[in-house]
Amino acid sequence: MRIKTMLCAAALLSTAVTNTAAAMDQGDWLLRFGASYIDPKSNNHEVVSVDSATSMTFNFSYMMTRNWAVEVLAAWPFKHDIELKDGTRVGSTKHIPPTVSLQYHFAPVSKFQPYVGFGVNYTRFFSEQTVGPLEGIPLDLDASWGLAGEVGADIMLNEAWFLNLNIRYIGIETDATLGGDPLGKVKIDPWVYGGNIGFRF
């Protein structure tokens, strides 16, 4: 449902822009920059939950052919609050989620250019802090490796500039340690919603 809604919105938006289409060619680079909203799964852990977060993101794709591309996603660090199940805030963490994906672009000669991608994510957590009832107790979150999928669309404004909307699902889970004692795995597994302005060169 989320994917269908995003694609419908992108299709409607494409009718409001110029009819000029710019074909993607082998060797093109696509740079997209904007913001993304991370929405973690609701049941992260038996004891704690991880809140949503928004940050600046950017990605670039290299067109290996007119249809196939390799994309790298990067971001300004996201900051998440960590709460107990009753809503008490007990900590926070930051993370960066670099992701490499193989993309297939369905309509590289069209104004509305949808694509799908599948790849690998590496998430590194840092600046873990505890507050409230856990203040002063060291919190550590291990790095995560996981699979990632995406669906998106580029909407060409002219030969160089375009708009971009995308939805990703990223498998992120981390082993948490509090005061040296293991808490088990915290499964974040977020949906990520992004909006960008893009440049082709």
Image (tube, rainbow, N blue to C red):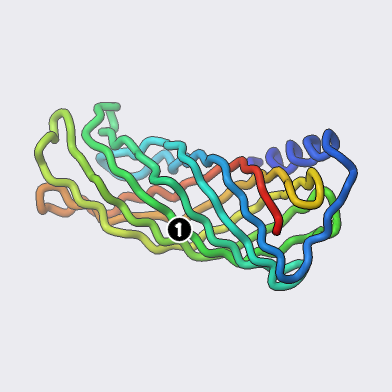
Work out whether 15 lies above or below 22.
Answer: above
What residue is shown with label 1? 98
Judge from the rendering whether residue 80 lies leftward or rightward of residue 66; answer left or right.
left
Judge from the rendering whether residue 107 lies leftward or rightward of residue 32; answer left or right.
right
Q: Residues within 10 Å of mark 1 (few under 14, many from 20)?
A: some
In which quadrant is the N terminus drawn? top right
Residue located at (37% from left, 35% from top) = 51
Closer to us: 14 or 58? 58
Residue 173 percent location from the top left of the image: 36, 55
Judge from the rendering whether residue 165 lies leftward or rightward of residue 111; answer left or right.
left
Work out whether 87 lies above or below 78.
Answer: above
Task: Name the image quarter holding residue 124.
Answer: bottom left
Residue 13 percent location from the top left of the image: 78, 36
Residue 141 percent location from the top left of the image: 25, 52
Closer to us: 54 or 169? 54
Work out whether 13 lies above or below 113.
Answer: above
Residue located at (23% from left, 36% from top) = 91
Residue located at (39% from left, 63% from top) = 145
| Mark 1 residue type | Pro
Residue located at (68% from left, 45% from top) = 164
Work out whether 34 lies above or below 132.
Answer: below
In which quadrant is the C terminus drawn? bottom right
Closer to us: 90 or 187? 90
Task: Name the image quarter holding residue 43.
Answer: top left
